[in-house]
Amino acid sequence: MQQSRRRFLAVAVGGLLVTPALAGPADAGTAWSRVPQIRRRIRPPRFPRRTFPITSYGAVGDGTTKCTEAFGQAVAACAAAGGGRVVVPAGTYLTGAIHLADNVDLHLEAGATIRFSHEPADYLPAVYTRYEGIELMNYSPFIYAHGRTNVAITGEGVIDGQADATHWWDWTSDPAPTESPDKKLLASMAEQGVPVAERMFGEGHYLRPNLIQLYRCRNVLIEGVTVKDSPMWNIHPVLCANVTIREVTVDSPNGPNNDGCDPESCVDVLIERCEFNTGDDCVAIKAGKNADGRRVNEPSMNVLVDSCTMRDGNGGVTVGSETTGGVRWVFAWNCEMSSPSLERAIRIKTNPERGGYVKDLYFKDITVGQAADAVVEIALNYENKNTGPYFPDVGTIDIRGLRAGKAPKAFNLIGNPGNPIKGVRVADSVFEEMTEADVVTDVTGFELRNVWVNGHRV
């Protein structure tokens, strides 16, 4: 196995090297010097010391009394006073949608659980949101803010979406009414340029809301809490600037599309010391989709992923598949990833309908104990689409100091015919127990330096 693998790499990789060095990844040291500058710009918001316990507004933590009105009153009072902390004491609080306001920190004390209602009507009226990279009017995300400054969700408590096989998740499969017709309708509206205000979904439709979505907000902090069992994506900042997500646990391994944290079209984002156990990608950096992504045309830039742990998931650190507005300057380091159900560690996915660019991605000191597919995957044929009018520009990707234990493949790199992946360097890395040959097609500038696979230097 080892000898045949070495022969494959010599053939597959040999014709793809460029000399003497790659234009972008060769400057990895210069690229990493950006990190301290980005980090200095990312500053969590600060709040006045005023507190507004939700129990002062009628909330009862018995798990059965609906507290939606109490949450709304506490947030309104906090905002009217000039800001502060809306406190959720120990107990279990059933509620519908919670909408945050300027200068409000929603703080869950130890022993507190916010448990969201199963009733879709509790997330109406519809709000301006994004569903898989396309803007629309839909059910409110469970915790939501739009156009706010200085917003936070903090504490030691649990945010429980309560989605399960009979609530929300059942919208993805027969025999119940499913989201598929609505997804096609929304995509068609976006292609035709229907104004967002007229893309009215919500009641009578089946597009699942996110658990936490902060939309066009500035100065965002999510810290300390545990989130679980979202209808789909768990934490979804959209078009935000200055975002800190710190020491958060996402425990949502069973649901469809239960991504952990998906910053989309955001600038200056720090995700640090978080733990992800998800039913889809752990961290997925996005930038809008297809026609609507081209209309909005906002990238994700300056995203830092530091010292996170990834367990179950389709990908550990992922870019895509919604890449239309572009993704650039992503740095991930000191992360640990391992699970029999972690499909890939580093994953980039897009296709010729998305367009946009994905470049200047830098990874170092990543430890992968076990992966179920490829350790590193860059696929420009996502959803098996190899042709289209908007080829994505993907390249300038640098990986160094990666240590992988067990996986079928080290690399699954699939460009488009005539539109290759351009510039991937892997250096000072070890892949210990790989059982299958790599796939490397339509790639230019693939360079391995001091890389060991199955005990052999390649």
Image (tube, grey):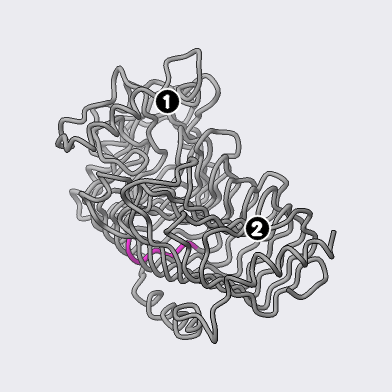
Instruction: Tell me which secondary structure the magenta stretch mostly adopts.
Output: strand
Instruction: Using the image, determine if residue 146 lies above or below residue 457.
Output: above
Residue beneath the point at 54% across and 55% down:
414
Label 1 belongs to which residue? Answer: 117
Say which amino acid is labelled 1.
Ser
Q: Which of the marked residues, 2 or 1, is nearer the chain's N terminus?
A: 1
Spot occupied by residue 239 in the image (x, y as percentages of width and height): 28, 54
User: Residue at horizontal 42%, vertical 29%?
Assistant: 60
Circle 2 residues within 10 Å: few <14, some 14–19, many ≥20: many
Q: Which mark is residue 320?
A: none
Closer to the camera in the image, 64 or 298: 298
Indicate the quadrant where residue 200 lies.
top left
Which is closer to the viewer, label 2 or label 1?
2
When the figure is inspected, residue 61 is found, relative to residue 452, above or below; the finding is: above
What is the number of callouts on the image? 2
Contact flag, marks 2 and 1 (Cβ < 8 Å): no
Percent across and percent down for residue 96 are 36, 29
The x and y percentages for residue 322 are 38, 48
Q: Quadrant of the C terminus?
A: bottom right
User: Which portion, as a residue range, is magenta?
Assistant: 266-271
Residue picked out by circle 2: 375
Question: Residue at image x 44%, y 77%?
Answer: 35
Left or right placement of residue 412 versus residue 40 in this view: right
Q: Which residue is nearer to you in this view: 394 or 106? A: 394
Nearer-the-camera pick, 152 or 41: 41
Q: Is residue 268 magenta?
A: yes
Quadrant including the N terminus = bottom right
Residue 250 position within the rendered picture, expressed as x and y whole percent measured from the top left = 54, 47
Q: Is residue 443 left or right of residue 67?
A: right
Does dot 1 land on a helix, a strand or a loop?
loop
* Placement of 307 over or under 227, stated as above or below: below
